[in-house]
Image (cartoon, rainbow, N blue to C red):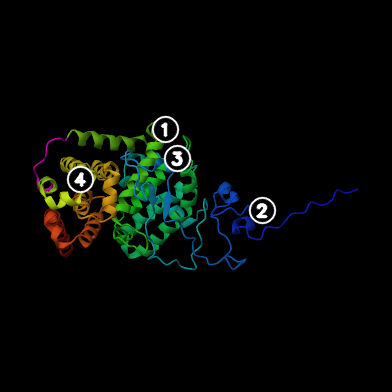
Amino acid sequence: MPLPRRTHTKSRGGCFECKRRKVKCNEAKPICAGCIKHETPCDYPSAEGSSQRMSPAPPPRPDRLILPSLLISTADSSVAAAPHGIGVLSTGPRHSLEPDPTTPLKRLGSFDTEDMTLWHQFITSTAATMSGPWVTELPKIALSCDYLIHGMMSTAALHLAYLHPDQLERYQLLSVQHQDVALGPFQIAMSNITTENCNQVFGFSLLLMVSHFVSFRAPEFFFHSSATGNNGLSDWVIWHRGCQTILNQARESITSGPLAPLIGEEQRARIYTEATNQPSGDENDKSLENLLRCLNKSPAIKASTTVAEMEAYEDATTRLRRLLKASSQTEDSVIRRAFASIWPVIISDIFIQLLSQLKPLALVIMAHYCLLIKNCHSCWYMEHRAYHMFDAVKQNLSEEWTIYIKHPLRVFAAAIREDDANLAA
């Protein structure tokens, strides 16, 4: 007697990828088990129950990638309540790009001739503008990690957009497409960092940092917007701290792995900075010294500032003075970039809270940090970032506080005049 046929309830709400592969979907959201296993984009039918895939445009990428909760604070573990967002990796806004409906979708691990051009661009040109491991080691560890390959192609597209401004939109769109495809599997990997994947996760997070620096990529990201939930400057600082948490979680494996030279650059910059104890006496230092004097002597500031906030201001200013002095004493562009990356990581959580609240003193200190970024102007992806940041500071700072940013104002005004003269020549 034949066995009775086992009945089952057919899933009608499964994702498009499981339907395409003709397998049962467990309908977990936002990413089902099958798409996690195969590292593919996971899209569901619309709420109206449409069985057709909506539009050929790329699926929207998450604007924020949340790190594991244990990584929330990196600089000041004594702070009981960190500001919302610390430990978040933000990919930044990209609302200005309109995809061409005829452009084929990018899929994880699937590459066409145009993608091979981007790969060639990265390994022969883009990587050399960054530092050693990007040239020799990153391509090797990417061969077993599709999302890292897409990240490299995204960065190469940004570099080509810089080199060929007449094709800016084309390369920006390519960059966004590759980053979109990579972010899902990267987020999955980031939630479970191991000795096997830590170098790939860390490498991709640094490529995301490059995309944040690129001067033509949504400069408005620095401006506060309650409509979009963007906290502007403080979000940008938080991004760097998010990168550092990945390193902190797997430091031993990363420092003994192929990307170890990158950590060596950071350590060399820190040692150089710690050896810089005496004030430099230059205009940068005098301007910050004047700010410290104001902090300590102004009754109005003392009356409206808590002891913890005052300590956060003083700490951020003192650390910035050392970094500015160290940066002015070297012409090594790699080390200068390391100096610029250190300060967002070592300032306190309280200072970031003050910056997110657009407190004038925090903005004044941030205006001086722009001078540190400006020292990296020879790097293609940092060329004009200091100008955008400084513009955001000025927009949020009332006129009564501009007396404390007179020096940065002079520096940036002179730099703009020099740029204009070079363009006219």
**Mark closest to the chain's N terminus, 1 or 4:** 1
Q: Which residue is mark 4?
A: 310
Residue extent of the magenta highlight: 276-284
* 219 relative position to 44: left or right: left
Q: Secondary structure at mark 2?
A: loop
- Provide residue 33's location: percent of width, then percent of height: 59, 49
* 9 relative position to 363: left or right: right
Q: Secondary structure at mark 1?
A: helix
Q: Which residue is mark 1?
A: 253
Residue 125 appearing in the image: no
Give the numbered dot on residue 24.
Answer: 2
Q: Residue at x 40, y 39 (%)?
A: 137
For mark 1, does the 10 Å Cα neighbourhood hold few (<14), some (14 to 19), or many (20 or more) residues? some
Question: Could you tell me how far apart the alpha carbons at marks 4 and 3 are, in whole angstroms?
Answer: 45 Å
**Three-letter code, disc 3:** Ile
- Label 1 near label 2: C-beta < 8 Å? no
Mark 4 or mark 2, which is nearer to you? 4
Residue 369 appearing in the image: yes
- Provide residue 324's location: percent of width, then percent of height: 17, 44
Question: Could you tell me how far apart the alpha carbons at marks 1 and 3 are, in whole angstroms?
Answer: 14 Å
Q: Which residue is mark 3?
A: 141
**Three-letter code, disc 2:** Lys
Q: Quadrant of residue 223?
A: bottom left
Residue farthest to the right, as pictured = 1
Q: Secondary structure at mark 4?
A: helix
Mark 1 or mark 4, which is nearer to you? 4
Q: Residue at x 40, y 65 (%)?
A: 97
- Provide residue 302's location: percent of width, then percent of height: 16, 49
